[in-house]
Amino acid sequence: MRRPPSVPSTRLAAAAAAALVGASLLAAPAQAAEPFPDTVPLPDGFQPEGIESGRGTTLFVGSLADGAIWRGDARTGEGEVLAEGAEGRVSVGIAYDASTDRLWVAGGETGEVRVYDGTSGELLRTYSLAGTGFLNDVAITRDAVYVTDSNVQQLVVVPTPGGEPGDAASTVPLTGDLQYVADGFNANGIVADPSGRTLLVVQSATGLLFQVDPATGGTEQVDLGGETLVNGDGLELRGRTLWAVQNQDNVVTEVALAGDLASGEVVARLTDDDFDVPTTVAVAAGRLYAVNARFGTTPTPTTEYDVVQVGR
C-alpha cells in the first residue's frame, strides 16, 4: 500500500518533538486552488465519536446520540447527514471499505454492528450479539470485519466472503499479553496491517499497544521503548506510521513502527488549540483529521461540534 503524505504539525507538545516530526513525515501535497478549512462544522448536538475517510476528500462521522452518520467534504467543509439516526441507536467507531463502498459501524452498549451503503446511506444489515460489553472500534481486512469490545476480552468478527457481509457475527477471545483490567476501558482503537495478517489494538486504561492475530485472537505487546498511550482511543495506520489519539490528553501521538510491527518509537505528540477531547482520526487527501467528542461538556441540542485538521 502506498503511504499517503501527511502534513507536518506546527504545534507540538515540546520543541524536541518538532525535529522528530519533521524528519518522519513526508512532504505535504501541493497547495490546492482553495485551502482546506482548518475546522469542519458538524450538526449542533451531534455528539460525534468516530471519524473515517472515504473516497477522494470525503469524511464520515458517527453520532453517539442516535447513531446518525454524517458525510462531508474535507476540501469544502460542507456536509450533511447521510443516514438518519434512530432512538436507541449508537455509532461509536466506524470504518469504510472503498472496494465495496460500505461503512461499518460499532454500536457500543447496544451490542450491534451495522453496515451501510456509503453512497446512499441505506442500512444494509444489522448484527446483534449477546454477551458483549461495549463495541468500540472497527477494522476491515479482505476476509472479515473486526470490532473491539472494551468491556469483554474478545473481538467481534463478521466474515465478508467475496466482499459480501456474512450471515452471522461471532466472537474470538483475546489471549496472550493483553489482559483486561477492572477499571477503565480496555481494547479500544483497532487497525489492520495492509496484509490483513495482523491487527493493532490499543488498551486505553494501560496505554499499551498490542499486535493481534485475527485468526486466533493471540496478542503480543508492541515494544514502545517504555512509552505508553494512556487514554488511547482511535488509531490510524499508513505504511508503518501509526497515529494514536489520547483523548483526555488532547494529544495525537505519532509512532514509527518497525517492519514486523513488534516495536515502535514515539516520534511526536501532536496537539492543537482547537482540540476538545478528540477521539478518533482519519487521513483524507494527505491530511490528518481529528473529531472533537467534547467529553466533559454537557451535550445539548445546541452544543457545537467539529472536525479539526491537525497540523495545518
Image: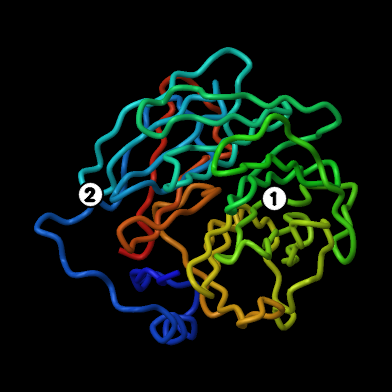
Instruction: Give the farthest residue toward the left.
Output: 33
> Which secondary structure, mark 1?
strand
Task: Point out the tag, 2 or 1, that comes first from the N-terminus.
Answer: 2
Residue 292 or residue 123, whichever sits in front: 123
Left or right: where 71 falls relative to 32: right
Give the colour scheme shown: rainbow
Label for residue 17?
A: none
Residue at left offset 34%, top offset 61%: 287
Going by the numbered disc 2, the residue's amino acid type is Arg
Q: How far apart are labels 2 and 1 at the CA level?
A: 29 Å
Residue 252 or residue 4, whichever sits in front: 4
| Crowdedness near tag 2: few (<14), some (14–19) or many (≥20) residues, C-alpha within 10 Å | some
Q: Position of residue 184 (x, y in %)?
A: 80, 47
Depicted 221 relative to depicted 122: above or below: below
Depicted 311 relative to depicted 134: above or below: below
Q: Position of residue 45 (x, y in %)?
A: 45, 24
> Which secondary structure, mark 2?
loop
Instruction: Give the farthest residue toward the front.
Output: 162
Label for residue 75?
A: 2
Q: Position of residue 225 (x, y in %)?
A: 72, 83
Residue at left offset 85%, top offset 54%: 174
Left or right: where 76 falls relative to 88: left
Instruction: Give the farthest residue toward the top.
Output: 87
Depicted 295 relative to depicted 241: above or below: above
Quarter containing the N terminus: bottom left
Going by the numbered disc 1, the residue's amino acid type is Asn
Residue at left offset 89%, top offset 64%: 176
Label for residue 188?
A: 1
Using the rendered view, name the quadrant where residue 131 is placed.
Answer: top right
Quarter containing the C terminus: bottom left
